[in-house]
Image (cartoon, helix red, strand yellow):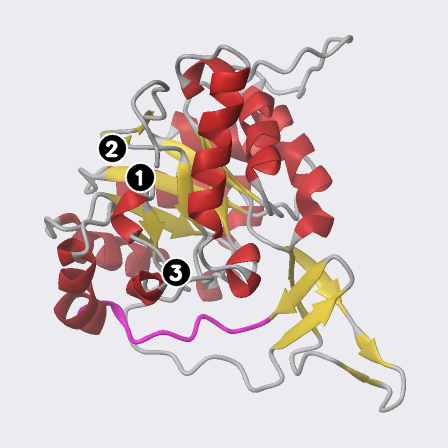
Amino acid sequence: MIGNSVNLAVQIGDIKLKNPVMTSSGTAGYGSELADYIDVGALGAVVTKSLTLKPKAGNAPPRISEVNGGMLNSIGLANIGIEKFINEKLSTLVKLGATVVVNVAAKRIEDYVSLVELLDSQEGVQGIELNLSCPNVSEGGIEFGSDLKILRKIVNRVRKICKKALIIKLTPNVSRISEFALAAEDEGADAVTIANTYVGMAINIYTRKPKIHNVTGGLSGPAIKPLTLSKVFEARNAIRIPIVASGGIMNWADAVEYILAGATAVQLGTVLFTKPDSPLDVINGIKEYCLGTGIGSVSELIGKVEADIAFSPHVKK
């Protein structure tokens, strides 16, 4: 059991998380699916799969493929739509005592605004995470999250109407993620999630076809942890708002690494497919680590990595 001898609470905007462990969007359904394995109310927060204005069937199969060190996925944002989530899923999460962060996705800025307007009035929702790895159809298909001007515009528009904690989930498929994190901070984001998946591909050498129907997919799992860890460290040197780290966390030690690199909270994703009760192991592992190293509060660890050389992300504060 988690005791009171270590303060595991952290703050993300107006949300006080009881501990820094969250789920990652798209890896635990709408959140209540985990209730068969753990008390979801014991987590720092549950992040839903990406929700869109209208229901989406997603991409054609095959859309998941295991690879060395992780998995590729190209689900295509399959979901029941925002209204059905509000009417049929949200109340269950509230009854379970979950701290709820809803991830939303869209192909137009106006649709992001509409999604946030619907969620901002829901008492059971504590935070909103914007998935900006979607193609902006109004701009020729470029991802929202890979264009600084578009990212600034959407965060600015949403911030004006959003009273809840606003988290921007950044794509790692850019040269300097610190520039995008700083842009999100400048436009009023409460936190950034670093990061979404990396573009990857796998081929069946016997059929000579890609293992994913859409050819490429998002790479997640332990293989990406060193990559994302460096991006968290880069961003921490550029921004002051909290960072939520997501990328290849398989155990409590991985989570502590991310916190030392500058993350306030962490999201578990791929590990849930093999061990759905892993969040509790991570929470307890962080607590035991703090007890063993004389740390009274997990917040004391944030950004405390000791590098021998100075590191500059080359962005202006």
Numbered label attached to residue 23: none
Amino acid type, callout 1: Leu
Whole-percent x and y of residue 32? 28, 63
Along the horizontal axis of the image, is 242 left or right of 65? Answer: left
Disc 3 and disc 1: Cα gap in Å? 14 Å
Graded by Cα atoms within 10 Å as few (under 14), some (14 to 19) or many (20 or more), the crowding at tag 3 reads many
Is residue 302 in sight in this rendering? Answer: no
Residue under the image location 71 percent in, 14 percent down: 311
Q: Residues within 10 Å of mark 2 (few under 14, many from 20)?
A: some
Vertical arrangement, residue 291 with respect to residue 80, above or below: above
Look at the numbered discs 3 and 2 and tell me whether their residues touch, using CB distance below 8 Å: no
Q: Amino acid at mark 2?
A: Ile
Going from N to C along the chain, the mark reached first, 3 or 2, is 2
Give the alpha-carbon distance from disc 2 to disc 1, as whole Å. Answer: 10 Å
Which residue is tagged 3? 105
Q: Residue furthest bottom?
A: 207
Q: Which residue is label 1 attached to?
A: 166
How many marks the image carries: the answer is 3
User: Residue drawn at (72%, 12%), measured in percent from left and top?
Assistant: 307
Using the image as rendered, state which of residue 256 and residue 216 is in the foreground.
256
In the picture of the structure, the residue carrying the numbered disc 2 is 15
Magenta residues span: 74-83
